[in-house]
Image (tube, grey):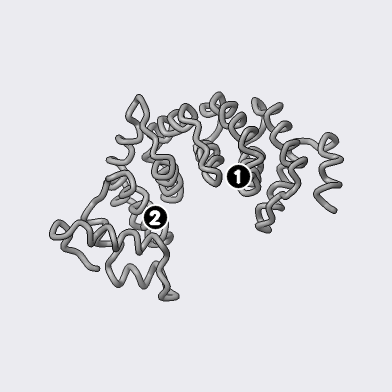
């Protein structure tokens, strides 16, 4: 068995080599099923967290998120705590993958997420649409309320920022719809943007197969609940 053999030689591999291995699992959508191998990866990453390169860290975070189940909750919590000290060292994209690590098991480290949100707020103008989608997911899923109030400030700024990203929205229309869906889950909505997302021409562009995603049904239901306040397409 590949995973059992891999577990036997983890200690002989460098962290970048483990990162390449992790990328292979993730790219082929193959979760790691060996609890022993997962434990070793958590331990190895933790021991080299201060020096690991971003690309290796992201690869390992992706496969750990994709593979971790209930037996890995404790090492996951420990990793989330350890990652807090790395927020200012790594790239914004890496920070977003740190924030996403606990999503599958709905395990949140409030201090880590707040630090990442504050970092995101500082670099918001340069963030990509896909980055906005990820941070909106984190804010919606964990429903976090921070002492700094950064989640509220971000949620209120994002609609205006989305207006400036029309080229990106045309390339990634579902990212736009997902952003709006996640923002409504935080009680933030923009009637004009909601109308754009539900406009028939936009729907044809976003869902060429004619089968809308769940974000469409969420936004459609939300718009109907607004009643007379919303005058756009349904």
Residue 103, image x and y in percent?
Answer: 52, 44
Q: Residue at x 46, y 33 (%)?
A: 113
Q: Residue at x 69, y 33 (%)?
A: 45
Q: Quadrant of residue 10 in the image?
A: top right
Q: Residues within 10 Å of mark 1 (few under 14, many from 20)?
A: many
Task: State which tag comes first along the sequence, 1 or 2.
Answer: 1
Q: Residue furthest bottom?
A: 210
Q: Secondary structure at mark 1?
A: helix
Which residue was labeled with disc 1?
65
Q: Answer left or right for 3 relative to 22.
A: right
Residue 83, image x and y in percent?
Answer: 57, 29
Q: Residues within 10 Å of mark 2 (few under 14, many from 20)?
A: many
Quadrant of the image containing the C terminus: bottom left
Q: Residue furthest left?
A: 228
Task: Report the number of discs.
Answer: 2
Q: Secondary structure at mark 2?
A: helix
Residue 5, image x and y in percent?
Answer: 86, 47
Q: Is residue 63 above or below residue 232?
A: above
Q: Which mark is residue 210?
A: none
Q: Are marks 1 and 2 in contact (CB under 8 Å)?
A: no
Q: Residue at x 73, y 37 (%)?
A: 39
Residue 119, image x and y in percent?
Answer: 43, 31
Q: Residue at x 32, y 41 (%)?
A: 155
Q: Answer left or right for 198 relative to 4.
A: left
Q: Answer left or right for 4 relative to 56.
A: right
Q: Quadrant of residue 53 in the image?
A: top right
Q: Which mark is residue 178?
A: 2
Which callout, 1 or 2, points to the residue nearer the camera? 1
- How far separated are the C-alphas under marks 1 and 2? 20 Å
């Amino acid at each position: 068995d590949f995973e059992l053999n891999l577990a036997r030689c983890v200690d002989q591999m460098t962290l970048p080599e483990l990162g390449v291995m992790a990328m292979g699992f993730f790219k082929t959508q193959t979760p790691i099923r060996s609890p022993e191998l997962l434990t070793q990866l958590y331990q190895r990453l933790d021991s080299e967290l201060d020096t690991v390169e971003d690309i290796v860290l992201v690869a390992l975070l992706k496969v750990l998120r994709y593979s971790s189940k209930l037996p890995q909750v404790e090492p996951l919590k420990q990793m989330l705590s350890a990652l807090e000290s790395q927020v200012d060292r790594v790239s914004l994209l890496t920070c977003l993958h740190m924030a996403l690590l606990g999503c599958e098991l709905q395990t949140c480290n409030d201090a880590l997420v707040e630090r990442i949100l504050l970092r995101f707020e500082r670099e918001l103008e340069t963030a990509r649409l896909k980055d906005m989608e990820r941070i909106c997911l984190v804010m919606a899923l964990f429903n976090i309320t921070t002492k700094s109030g950064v989640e509220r400030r971000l949620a209120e700024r994002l609609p205006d920022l989305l207006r400036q990203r029309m080229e990106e929205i045309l390339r990634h229309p579902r990212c736009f719809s997902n952003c709006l869906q996640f923002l409504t889950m935080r009680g933030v909505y923009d009637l004009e943007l909601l109308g754009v997302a539900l406009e028939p021409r936009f729907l044809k562009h976003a869902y060429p197969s004619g089968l809308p995603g769940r974000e469409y049904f969420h936004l459609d239901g939300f718009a109907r609940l607004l009643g007379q306040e919303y005058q756009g397409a349904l």
